[in-house]
Amino acid sequence: MRGLKDKVVIVTGGGSGIGSAICTRFCEEGSVVAVLDLNGPGAEAKAAAIRAAGGRAKAFQVDISDQKMVNAAVASVERELGPVDVLVNNAGWDKAGNFLDTDKTLWEKVVAINLYGPLNMHHAVLKGMSERGRGRVINIASDAARVGSSGESVYSFCKGGLVAFTKTLAREFASKQINLNVVCPGPTDTPMLKEVCGDSELGQKLYEGFKRAIPFKRLGQAEDIPGAVAFLASDDAAFITGQVLSVSGGLTMAG
Ligand code: NAD
């Protein structure tokens, strides 16, 4: 992929699942990766594994829903690794349930992580990108934002908001040569999917149902996602902004 060598890349939620695979891919491309995660040991382990493989990475423990912590973490990244070239907002969380069985405590947690988290990250990173007149943002939403997802109403509300937010910022920051795009995974076999489905009979039905619904007849794997993210961060995507790309084995085919 062209233009990723030596770029400073922040990946939120880089300590697990899809984020971990995205970190690996950017390191393979010669980028310098800041692994941001609430799970400090998870982020440390990922950064150490990248360094052991000859790559460049550093871990930063941060709760993306906490604006002060985010601002401090981004300042540390820029001080220790250099100005941020690419931001990948990947961290996310959900707990499945029917909407009427959910309460405000759960809504607040889902919104804090999946909406305020990306808001905080964009706010902390875009100022510097604007001043430099370059930058890439790739937001990891979900096919839930495009076609809905049973049992994930509030999460879908957030991911749909993230898509609309990305398109709006793509317009606002185009004059600064900053590209913002969205990648929507479908059901992907990660710790999050296992947690969302749970061990119940219903959860297992959901898990098997996903496979049947996907034209490729398999769940996504974390490693299916980073190619699209790396492409959108690369020089080859310099004229692409405000777009939404599903990586879901054909689950959604949007025009
Ligand atoms: P995961 O649970 O394996 O990893 C998520 C990571 O985010 C974890 O390391 C976790 O510690 C971190 N995180 C959670 N809350 C955080 C916070 N407040 N601050 C910082 N880090 C935090 O999940 P995953 O499946 O790899 O999901 C990655 C992204 O892909 C999420 O945005 C998710 O919504 C999206 N997605 C996943 C699926 C799927 O089926 N797995 C489908 C569509 C979209």
Image: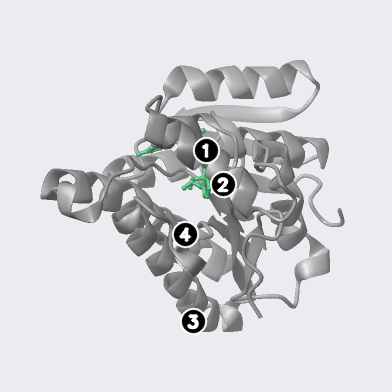
Give the spatial CA distance, label 1 vs label 3. Answer: 39 Å
The residue under the point 71% across, 62% down is 232
Name which residue type carries label 2. Phe
Q: Is residue 241 above or below residue 120?
A: below
Give the residue pinned by disc 4: 144
Q: Residues within 10 Å of mark 4 (few under 14, many from 20)?
A: many
Element assignment for label 2? helix
Instruction: Give x and y (percent) for residue 32.
Output: 69, 38
Position of 60 compared to 4: left or right? left
Give the spatial CA distance, label 3 vs label 4. Answer: 25 Å
Residue closest to the eye, 227 or 250: 250
Name which residue type carries label 3. Glu
Give the residue pinned by disc 3: 172
Instruction: Give x and y (percent) for residue 184.
Output: 58, 58
Q: Residues within 10 Å of mark 3 (few under 14, many from 20)?
A: few
Give the residue pinned by disc 2: 210
Give the label, 4 or 2, closer to the camera. 2
